[in-house]
Image (spheres, rainbow, N blue to C red):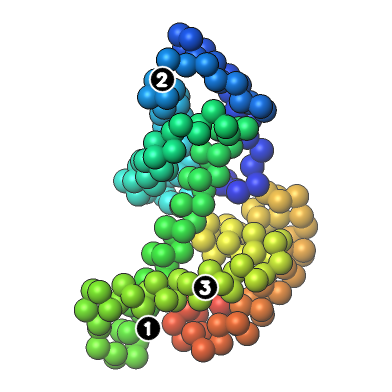
């Protein structure tokens, strides 16, 4: 089961004159392109499998992982500065997966709201703009939650984990998870009261 708090250790590679170690990264290489290619080959399959555990869709997972590597390529000259490349990649994939799930759920919530209220559907550009506004409000509300509340809320709503699974993953009692989730929902309802009809899937007990 996916979690942002997983402890990940960077492996050690030897490819020609290249060396990459965890901790204080030490890299000697002929070119950053060679390093990037090695990192891609050694990490891609595992990152894709990891993304699949969150998204439950191989194509979406592939797109997420590819985008993570595109961003890594854009700053490839700084790869050797990362203390743990492995941890960085898993964290980046996790964050992008959660953002993807959040976007899809907000978009679906908006569509459901329009259907159930018999509202006329906006054109694609207007709809996209409204979804982004909803996402930003949700992001701001999440950012204001205490860390444990936020983590539990995200695992419940974005990873679809049951309270018992969350408790096992975080080393907490089920009762603690229930209490923290109740606290998160209460705070979110206050902060997003005007959006409750649209974002009910996030803000109601389920």
User: Gap in Å between the C-alphas at discs 3 and 2?
Assistant: 42 Å
In the image, is residue 83 above or below residue 153? above
Choose top left, top right, bottom left or bottom right for residue 128: bottom left
Q: Nearer the viewer, mark 1 or mark 2?
A: 2
Q: Are marks 1 and 2 in contact (CB under 8 Å)?
A: no
Q: Which circle marks residue 105 in the picture?
A: none
- Label 1 to label 2: alpha-carbon separation: 52 Å
Q: Locate residue 37, reporting x and y percent.
A: 38, 24
Please report contact status of discs 3 and 2: CB closer than 8 Å, yes or no: no
Q: Is residue 52 visible?
A: yes
On the image, numbered disc 1 is attached to which residue? Answer: 113
Q: Earlier in the sequence, mark 1 or mark 3?
A: 1
Front residue of this view, candidates 157 and 86: 86
Q: CA distance from mark 1 to mark 3?
A: 16 Å
**Dot 2, crowdedness within 10 Å: few (<14), some or many (≥20)?**
few
Q: Secondary structure at mark 3?
A: helix
Q: Position of residue 104 (x, y in %)?
A: 39, 64
What residue do we see at 50% from left, 31% from top?
79
Q: Is residue 206 left or right of residue 104?
A: right
């Amino acid at each position: 089961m996916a979690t942002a708090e997983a402890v990940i250790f960077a492996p050690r590679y030897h490819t020609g004159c290249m060396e990459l170690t965890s901790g204080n990264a030490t890299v000697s290489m002929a070119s950053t392109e060679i390093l990037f290619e090695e990192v891609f080959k050694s990490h891609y399959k595992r990152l894709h499998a990891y993304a699949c555990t969150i998204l439950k869709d191989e194509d979406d997972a592939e797109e997420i992982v590819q985008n993570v590597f595109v961003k890594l390529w854009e700053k490839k000259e700084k790869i050797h500065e990362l203390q743990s490349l492995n941890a960085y990649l898993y964290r980046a994939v996790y964050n992008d997966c959660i953002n993807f799930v959040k976007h899809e759920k907000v978009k679906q919530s908006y569509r459901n709201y329009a259907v159930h209220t018999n509202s006329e559907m906006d054109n694609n550009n207007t709809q996209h703009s409204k979804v982004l506004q909803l996402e930003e409000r949700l992001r701001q509300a999440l950012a204001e939650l205490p860390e444990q509340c936020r983590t539990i809320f995200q695992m419940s709503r974005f990873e679809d984990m049951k309270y018992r699974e969350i408790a096992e993953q975080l080393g907490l009692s089920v009762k603690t998870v229930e209490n923290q989730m109740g606290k998160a929902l209460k705070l979110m309802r206050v902060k997003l009261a005007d959006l409750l009809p649209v974002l009910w899937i996030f803000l109601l007990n389920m």
